[in-house]
Amino acid sequence: MELLVAAAVGLMTAVGIYLVLRQRTFPVILGLTFLSYAVNIFIFAAGRLAVNMPPIIKDGASYTDPLPQALVLTAIVISFGMTAVIVIMSLGAYLEAGNDKVDETAP
Amino acid sequence: MSHWIIAPVVLPALMAALMVIALRRNLFLQRVASVASILALNAIAIALFWSATTHGPEAYFLGNWPAPFGIILVLDRLSALMVLLLTTLALPVLLYAAGSGWDAKGAHFHPLLQFLLMGIAGAFLTGDAFNLFVFFEVLLIASYGLMIHGGGRDRTRAGIQYIAFNLVGSSLFLIALATVYSVTGTLNMADLAQKLPLLPQGDTALIRTAAILLILVFAIKGALVPLQFWLPGTYANAPGAIAAMFAVMTKVGAYATIRFGTLIFPTTLPATGTMIADLILPAALITLIVGAIGILGATTLPRLVAFAAIASMGTAFTAIAGFTPQSTSAALYYILHSTLATAALFLIADLVTRRRTDASLTAQPPIAGSGLIAALFMAGAVAIAGMPPLSGFIGKLLILQATRDQAPLIWTTILMASFLMILGLARAGSVLFWKSHATAGTPAPHPTEPLAIAATCALLAALAALTVFAGPVTHWLDATAAGLYDPAPYIASTQLYEDR
């Protein structure tokens, strides 16, 4: 399981970085989304991987760390909002400039 | 427990919501509410400043949860100073935006400005590393909206680059925080300061990685080379008043570096040692040179000022990298100065560009009110280049004094860069204001905008005050820097693990 999670985080980060370096806004946004997915799973792993354990302390029962789950919720909400912002901005830039290049210099 | 500590966060949030919901259609009432809010924030900042000076660090427990289980805000001398700097800058910028009509060029200028103030004030006050991330996002999302205020093709495109850059930065920040949490099990800054020295040897590699990631994130915010690429495009394309407000945003990166470098990763920590200082110093010196060369090579006035902002961040980080009480005190003085000077210069650049057909540094017919604006530009250029008699000179002198032991490298770089800056600014000034008289044509009429001019003068007057009162200010900053290197009172104020 550790290997699977680590590979998923690494692969998604690699895909994210590759896409962020693309020239057009749509792949860049996809890349940012992949990066945020990788980060979210990474934060989860920061609380140690545990299967079938509740994030609640009960006498005698083992539990998983609840704080990373709270952190990851915050991170998901923020990255979701930020992605919405950049999608709208890219759409605005596309409609105004007529193309979706990220880095076109002004004529 | 003083509830006023959270006021700089809550008040702008409430005012922004009020403006969006109730005053959406009435720009005049929005202006009144915005000025009232910032005046109140100024009063609160002065009260907090006074409290931090006389009573020392004080923590505010959100929801009254004990630290480190709940989030805390901590008011100490450094955060009080930064909040005061923020509110001092916000008032002239707001008056300028109203006086020049920038706030009428698009919807929601004032609410976004309030949200920006909320995010920056929160970032200065928080005592929790994850909460710092959240406030970074608050200030960033407000800055995205402000950056594209007024719209336009180039501005929107620069905005996308700015957002993409910062989203990658946010991802790095989260990775760093998750790494710190996985090793220490806490994100409270005071708790981290206590737990990191006790770490087993095997975990130090992870902490070093996290420290470097954190410094990378703060370097993005502070526009350190090689992470400065977002700044010239963003600041040069942002509306003038907003670019002036952004002058304090780079200082959030400088503040976070000082806070983390003294409280959490001090040079005495075996895991990191002087690693952070060793990384920052070369980057800062190159930043300074890149900024100075950028001033020489800039083709438009706003880009020139943006590179001046980069050069000033280079100077500030050179002092920060010393990590001694003396160099930190010098860095803080320079941060105060460079925030006000950069903001003033952005406002002056905006005064000039709006009176011309374009922003390029070429000779064009003289602008309306050329004499007064040229004098303002002269004063702003003297301040940012660090020439006497304004505070930039004192700031650079303090930094040179604090870096005596590395004089050959640091002094040469700072003095050479200052020379290049003087050269670039003088060239820009002569092209803009002197050569214009040799071109044919008459000044295009333009409203005099007394409020905008007065706001610019107010910033320059603040610089003059910083010069005149340099003695008491440096005395106060020395005590602040000494407090940063003796974090026991800060940690004690957070009452970690105590049942209150």
Image (cartoon, coloured by chain):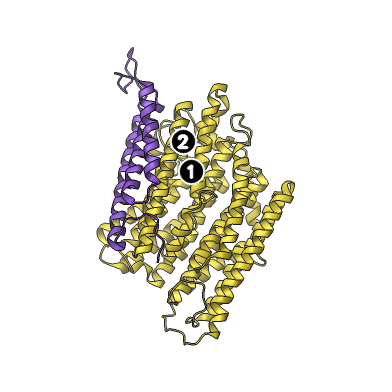
Chain colours: A purple, B yellow
Q: CA distance from mark 2 to mark 1?
A: 9 Å
Residue type at tag 1:
Val
Residue A61: percent from left, percent from top: 32, 14
Q: Is residue B7 visible?
A: no
Looking at the rendered image, the quarter that the C terminus of chain B falls into is top left
For marks 2 and 1 on the same chain, the one whose residue lies earlier in the sequence: 2
Label 1 residue SS:
helix
Figure quadrant of the N terminus of chain B? top left
Residue B217 circle label = 1
Left or right for B125, reference B315? left
Q: Position of residue B19 (x, y in %)?
A: 30, 59
Camera-nearest residue between B491 and B417? B417
| Up-down relation of residue B189 to residue B204 (above or below) | below
Please give the label number shown on residue B176.
2
Q: Residue at x 36, y 43 (%)?
A: A19
Q: Is residue B432 left or right of residue A34?
A: right
SS state under label 2:
helix
User: Which residue does the image show at 32% across and 43% down from the upper left?
Assistant: A30
Instruction: Name the mark on residue B399.
Output: none
**How many other residues sit within 10 Å of disc 1, few (<14), some (14-19) or many (≥20)?**
many
Q: Nearer the viewer, residue B411 or B382?
A: B411
* Residue B14 position within the rendered picture, expressed as x and y whole percent measured from the top left: 33, 53
| Image position of B391 with respect to B118: above or below | below
Asked if the residue under mark 1 is in contact with the one under mark 2, i.e. CB atoms within 8 Å, the reply is yes
